[in-house]
Image (cartoon, rainbow, N blue to C red):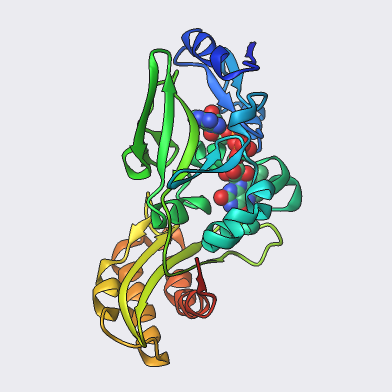
Amino acid sequence: MESLLPKTYEEIPGCLRQMTEKSRFIGGGTDLIIKMRMGLAAPDAICYLGYVRELKEIRREEEWLSIGSCATMTEIEQDPEVREHYPALMDAAADVGSLQIRNNGTIGGNIGNASPAGDLLPVLYLYDAVLEIMGPDGVRRAGIDEILAGPGRLNLACNEAILRILLPPSTGYTSFVKLGSRKKVTISRIGVALRIEMDGDYVKEMKMMVGAIGIKPVRLEKAEEFIKGRTLNEQNILDIAAILSDYIREHVAKEFDRDYKVFASRGVVMDAFHRLRRD
Ligand SMILES: Cc1cc2nc3c(=O)[nH]c(=O)nc-3n(C[C@H](O)[C@H](O)[C@H](O)COP(=O)(O)OP(=O)(O)OC[C@H]3O[C@@H](n4cnc5c(N)ncnc54)[C@H](O)[C@@H]3O)c2cc1C
């Protein structure tokens, strides 16, 4: 197996040209190494981008917050810009796995994994994230939904790498709450990401993304419509929880913990509203 290790941004295209359908990128390896050990992946080459300084950085760039795809969960959680302006992303990064997983697992790998239970995914949808992608012949940008194809699948060629995740400015209040199993290290069973803009006591706009109830994060438009122009009182929040329960009952198959999710969604929604913080 060949190792492709670009040290600078300029060296990346040369490495991409050597990649085949069997080659893989690697970030922290928390997912890929397990697959390789289980015999589920046998790459002919592995490309590690983490030596390229720009791909580790989190920095403000004109209107965007630019997050290098090799930034780890710990780096994201601790970044002052993320903490101040994207609290839902901070919460999602802080909730991933254990400390060891957060110290190694990257945002690029979380997207690359494309797991329906990936914690960062509903939040990246919430903030309308744009991905910067490099192929052998150049760089392009695409929205997160264009790239995420389904469980374990991305709309990327085998030699296209996610370089950076770009977040536009966020206004209003946001939060992310995940409910997992009772094991210490949990894989998300439901993750609710909320963004709300208020007009005095009334909700002007809400965006609600729910992870781990579909093959991709689900936007709960019915709840968004319901709350527009209303106050955030307890009854309205309970009504939103009921909308989510109904959605799960209709769309989630029984073998994917449907009954547990219907029951648990109420608490997750209540928590998500109580944890809203200004961006
Ligand atoms: C015990 C345990 C607990 C976990 N808990 C959680 C959890 O709570 N929440 C959660 O969301 N996940 C969890 N995970 C899954 C995983 O750790 C995360 O998804 C992590 O973010 C993966 O990042 P990585 O850098 O380690 O990915 P890697 O294993 O390095 O890569 C994962 C995939 O992404 C691709 N990839 C990596 N970088 C790029 C790139 N720049 N461009 C294109 N493709 C790329 C790789 O080719 C590979 O297919 C857990 C895993 C373990 C083992």
Q: Going 61% across and 60% down the picture, which residue do you hit?
A: 83
Residue that lies at the very extreme toward the front in this rendered image:
62
Choose between 173 and 179: the one closer to the eye.
173
Ligand 1's quadrant: top right
Choose between 109 and 85: the one closer to the eye.
85
Image quadrant assignment for residue 228: bottom left
- Residue 20: x and y in percent read 46, 12
Q: Is residue 228 above or below residue 247?
A: below
Image quarter in which the N terminus is found: top right
On the question of residue 169 being in view, the answer is yes
Q: Going 25% across and 71% down the picture, which residue do you hit?
A: 222
Q: Is residue 91 above or below residue 236?
A: above
Q: How many marks?
A: 0
Q: Going 45% across and 37% down the picture, which residue do you hit?
A: 152
Image quadrant assignment for residue 238: bottom left
- Residue 62: x and y in percent read 45, 43
Q: Is residue 178 above or below residue 10?
A: below
On the question of residue 35 being in view, the answer is no
- Residue 244: x and y in percent read 35, 73
